[in-house]
Image (cartoon, rainbow, N blue to C red):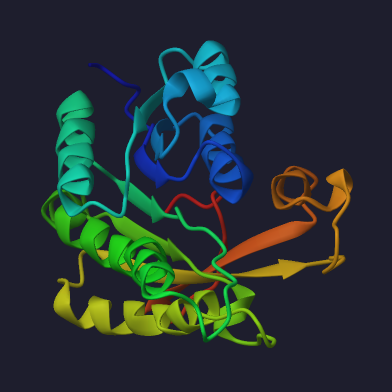
């Protein structure tokens, strides 16, 4: 497929709702091509259907279970085949697993497969394409990586592990920039947030800033407005 010279080809995981949807929409508003995925099938992903209808030549959606390494590998291969390159990877897919430290082993395994291993394996699979494009990989983390509370395990443990991105940068040539993010919000009601305080709404209202720190040169930027 042919695309405008200035448009970037962007992979975003977890685009069916929340932060992933808002990030995908921001890139689309910037004129970029977004290849998104989420666990839900398209017929059950109303937000993805809406973005497809509004951006038929710029948005592509795949149903992908990122806890399965083969599914991630196939998704990256399919995404690169669409336009012959990948410029940006936003590894966003994840879910709260607040089960406490006495959680079942299955909860622990699912949490780490989804909230930690999936980011590593997506980076591994996308690395060859990003090396060719001088691309960027961004891993969405959580405030639980920096400050948490009782009862949030094992989710907070996996998020605390995500600063491994700095070590990932040491293993990838300097041409590829690696970043992790944290969220800064003007207002957030921790308990029972109203519709107006949902993360995707806050992003749209520009009340939620998504910052990426790129390693080894730590440089915060507001995404996705800068041309990375």
Side (left or right) of 225 relative to 117: right
Q: Position of residue 130 (x, y in %)?
A: 20, 53
188 is higher (above) or lower (below) than 37: below
On the image, the x and y values in percent for residue 158 come to 43, 78
Q: Which quadrant of the figure contains the N terminus?
A: top left
Image spot of residue 93 (x, y percent): 45, 53
Is 129 left, or right, of 40 in this rendering?
Answer: left
Q: Residue at x 52, y 86 (%)?
A: 101
Q: In the picture, residue 193 is in which quadrant?
A: bottom right
Would residue 142 be found to the left or right of residue 227 on screen? right
The picture places residue 73, in percent across and down from the top left corner, at 16, 46
- Please, is residue 55 above or below residue 212 in the view? above
Using the image as rendered, state which of residue 9 and residue 123 is in the foreground: 123
In this picture, residue 201 sits left or right of residue 35: right
Decide if residue 32 is in sight here: yes
Q: Is residue 216 visible?
A: no
């Amino acid at each position: 497929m042919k695309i405008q010279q200035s448009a970037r080809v962007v992979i975003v995981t977890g685009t069916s709702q929340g932060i992933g949807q808002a990030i995908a929409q921001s890139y689309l508003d910037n004129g970029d091509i977004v290849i998104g995925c989420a666990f839900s099938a398209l017929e059950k992903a109303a937000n993805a259907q809406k973005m497809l209808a509004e951006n038929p030549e710029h948005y592509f959606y795949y149903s992908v279970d990122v806890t399965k390494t083969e599914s991630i590998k196939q998704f990256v291969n399919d995404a690169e085949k669409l336009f012959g390159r990948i410029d940006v990877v936003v590894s966003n897919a994840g879910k709260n697993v607040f089960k406490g430290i006495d959680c079942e082993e299955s909860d622990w395994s699912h949490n780490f497969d989804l909230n930690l291993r999936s980011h590593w394996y997506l980076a591994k699979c996308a690395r060859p394409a990003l090396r060719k494009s001088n691309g960027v990989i961004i891993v969405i983390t959580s405030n639980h990586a920096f400050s948490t509370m009782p009862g949030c395990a094992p989710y907070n443990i996996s998020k605390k592990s995500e600063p491994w991105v700095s070590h990932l940068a040491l293993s990838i040539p300097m041409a590829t920039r690696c970043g992790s993010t944290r969220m800064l919000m003007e207002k957030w009601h921790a308990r029972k947030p109203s519709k107006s305080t949902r993360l995707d709404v806050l992003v749209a209202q520009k009340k939620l800033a998504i910052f990426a720190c790129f390693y080894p040169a730590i440089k915060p930027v507001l995404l996705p407005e800068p041309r990375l």
